[in-house]
Image (cartoon, grey):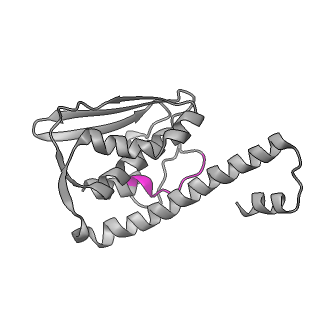
Amino acid sequence: IRSIGETLARGRVANGDRLREYAQLLVQEGHRLSHLIDNLLAYSRVTDVTQLYSFEPLSPTDVVGEALRGFQRLLQEGGFNVTVDVPATLPPVRADRTAIVLALANLIDNAMRYSGTSRTITIQGRLNGDVVELAVQDYGVGIEPGELQRVQQRFIRGRTAEGKGSGLGLAIVSRIAA
């Protein structure tokens, strides 16, 4: 962000298309930084003050919609095809709204980041006995079964993970689910 800002401040970008490209990079990197800060704060919250959760009955459809709203622009710009199959007939879940939306947002973010060239994300909800299960699926490289436990620890990323990431997302999801 600083590098792009310095380049712009020094007037090294004169072309309109190039200026738009730099502006888009600033927005993208600003989003990435905000996400990292949110994750650091969220990890602190879910590990230190779980007694402050406010549990209430929540519609699975509503929480999935709320989590997706934060990604609409990025999903569209990234050319993602998102399929949501969360029946409105699912019973409410007893959860903390902020925490459950954060968990879903981290799963959506990971799905976008690691979807590879497929650009397809599926979000499903189903009733398994008396438990509502929500799943976010992409069709990228995936996580090796032997690494699943490991990547749920903070600051740990899978061996096949490429690109930028803090290693906090799945740790947050795991802690919220617990």
Specify whether 108 is left or right of 87: right
Q: How many numbered marks, from 0 up?
A: 0
| Above or below, 14 relative to 138 | below
Residue 91 spot, x, y in % from top left: 15, 39
* Quarter of the figure that contains the C terminus: bottom left
Return the residue found at the far front: 16
Is 166 included in the stretch rendered in magenta? Answer: yes
Residue 68 spot, x, y in % from top left: 41, 41
Magenta highlight range = 163-170
Is 7 included in the stretch rendered in magenta? Answer: no
Q: Quadrant of residue 29?
A: bottom right
| Above or below, 137 relative to 39 | above
Front one among 25 and 148: 25
Residue name at image x 68 percent, y 53 percent = 26
Q: Is residue 74 visible?
A: yes
Q: Can residue 147 be seen in this view?
A: no
Return the residue found at the far bottom: 48
* Quarter of the figure that contains the N terminus: bottom right
Residue name at image x 46 percent, y 62 percent = 38
Residue 126 spot, x, y in % from top left: 21, 33
Front one among 47 and 141: 47
Residue 35 spot, x, y in % from top left: 51, 57
